[in-house]
Amino acid sequence: MDLKVLLDIARKSIFTYFDKSLVLNKEFYLSNFDELSEQRASFVTLTMNGRLRGCIGSLTAYTQLYEDVFINARKAAFNDPRFEPLQFKDFTNIKIEVSVLTPPKRVTYIDRYDLKDKIIPNKHGVILSYNENQATFLPQVWEQLPSFDEFINSLCLKANVSASCLEENAQIFIYEAMKIKE
């Protein structure tokens, strides 16, 4: 798949939010890029001046890849609760990254040490689910949190659970991501 088309969809999705007179020709994309019709999960990450500016995505495939990227780009720009909605004046300063995820696979593990042997840094994204709480880190988060302990402890913090949840059978899922960025 030519992943550059995903960047095009994401950027135009955000731009057409600002300029409602423009509309993306969905049929053009779907007829020229077969993969966009597949049900796939994606994340769209926005950065500005090298810093995170928004990141929203889907962990499981529920719609066409075209729709998933279109919706997640807008959500990353305007609905990430960690940031104010993107302003038009900042639109040209954002950089976009799109990650297309493989279906998550559950990891069975005995303890933290066993789990460490089953997760491959820089390859696996990780979903942690414990009680009603859930969080994920994309594979590229390993760049900022390169050690297993840093990565997992930060993921637990993001999920608002104690790191001891791993000893209490927290569910762990792994996935991989094809990514493209501007």
Image (cartoon, grey):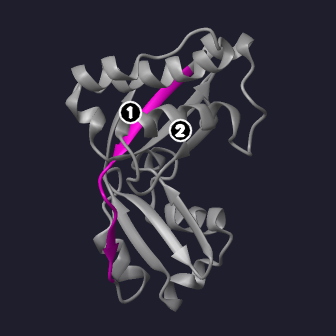
Closer-to-camera residue (15/165):
15
Sequence-wise first label, 2 or 1: 1
Instruction: Give the structural element (helix, strand or loop) at label 2.
Output: helix
Which label number is shown at residue 72?
A: 2
Identify the main secondary structure in magenta: strand
Which label number is shown at residue 74?
A: none
Q: Position of residue 99 (x, y in %)?
A: 39, 39
Tell me the residue at 69%/33% (across/down): 78
Q: Residues within 10 Å of mark 1 (few under 14, many from 20)?
A: many
Tell me the residue at 30%/73% (across/down): 117
Q: Is residue 100 visible?
A: yes
Which label number is shown at residue 66?
A: 1
Closer-to-camera residue (9/153):
9
Quarter of the rendering containing residue 19: top right
Q: Position of residue 138 (x, y in %)?
A: 45, 50
Horizontal relation, residue 64 to residue 93: left or right:
left
Which residue type carries mark 2?
Answer: Asn
Tell me the residue at 65%/66% (across/down): 157
The magenta stretch is: 95-108
